[in-house]
Amino acid sequence: MGRRILYVHGIGDIGGAERDLLAVAGRLDRTEWEPHLACPPGSPLDAEATRAGISVQPLVLTPWRKWYSPFVRSSSIARLRGLFERLRPALVHINDMWWAPHAVAARERARSGRIPIVAHVRQEIEPEKIRRYALERVDRVIAISHQVEEAVKSGGVATERVQTLYSGLELTSSAPRADYRPALCKRLQCPESDVLLGTVANLFPRKGQDVMLRALPAILEVIPSARYVMVGDDRTDYARELYAQAAGLHIAGRVHIVGFQDPVRPFLEAFDLYVHPALMEGFGIAIVEAMAAGKAVIATRTGGIPEVVEEGRTGLLVQPGDPAQLRDAVLQVLQNPERRNAMGAQGAERVRERFDLAATVAATETLYRRLLQG
């Protein structure tokens, strides 16, 4: 049996962080590692991890927020401590920083010896929040981008304890792509000749879909056949706000929220242009997926996105929260099909060169070995 790695993730729904966890943990060398995942029982993440052959340990953790009572915090820590003592992992990997304080406190109380802790930071973070999430007390921090790495170091974590590891994709063969456009247009009840602009992201305000809605009326003045398709959970309060916003802008018939989708590749293949209007973004795995599908990208100049999108070569970058810049960039690329196609091809090449899942898994395993060797 391999050495036990316990992944901890307190959210049961599936987004970019969860898909990345499943991709890496599911591809570890099982002769060397035995992956376990502590996550909410009965959740989509529980089901997907089980399907991937990852042993699931049921665990409910409350977020580490100052307004939670000491009793609630203590209960979460006690549950995690019990799991440490029962499972006795060789290493604990916190899949997002929100649960690092729980793990550090549980380790201090556990009777299973000092377990090395790795904490993944997957979003932009202000340096002053490093101590709030106990990142200076874990053994290693994995930053999702160099921008995040610099913020972590600015917050007081020693340079030798931080490493950037980009999320990766399992690269497919060069076989001809399937044509998913007819099926999507049938679902949207629109002509296949319509221009499809798409975003794949959780429907949260920080993802900036409302900014794209503000840009859309001016885009429609130039390209009346444009449609904006959002792939993400349509049950959120923000989704309802987006529907209301579209109605207020008189563009409701040109806006579609199609819910959570897995896999997302068929939607990306069907889009004419990928738009990622996030206000904050540690990395942006959906951007990588769009590039892998051969799509030009319009995204915001924030967080780790400039490390993913090569400005002018694989797409264009605009300031976050600026619908006028977003409109201009979208129109610039849509009105030049030759350039758009070239950007898509160069984006696919960039993914092959820099964001291969096999390289991410190998680097993760190397980090584990070095940490366990002391």
Image (spheres, helix red, strand yellow):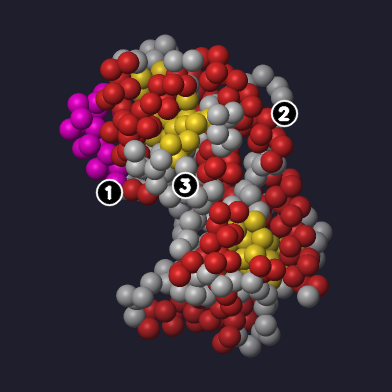
User: Which portion, as a residue range, is magenta?
Assistant: 237-255
Q: Magenta stretch containing residue 332, yes or no?
A: no
Residue picked out by circle 2: 173
* Marked residue nearer the N-terminal end (3 or 1): 1
Q: SS for tag 3?
A: loop
* Marked residue nearer the N-terminal end (3 or 2): 2
State whether the magenta stretch is mostly helix, strand or loop: helix
Residue at 39 percent of width and 15 percent of height: 194
Q: Which mark is residue 302?
A: 3
Mark 2: amino acid: Ser
Residue 193 lies, with reference to residue 25, above or below; the image says above
Q: SS for tag 2?
A: loop
Q: Magenta stretch containing residue 243, yes or no?
A: yes
Residue at 66 percent of width and 60 percent of height: 163
Is 128 on the left-hand or right-hand side of 22? Answer: left
Q: Position of residue 63 (x, y in %)?
A: 42, 68
Q: Position of residue 26 (x, y in %)?
A: 67, 52
Q: CA distance from mark 3 to mark 1?
A: 25 Å
Q: Is residue 289 visible?
A: no
Mark 1: amino acid: Asp
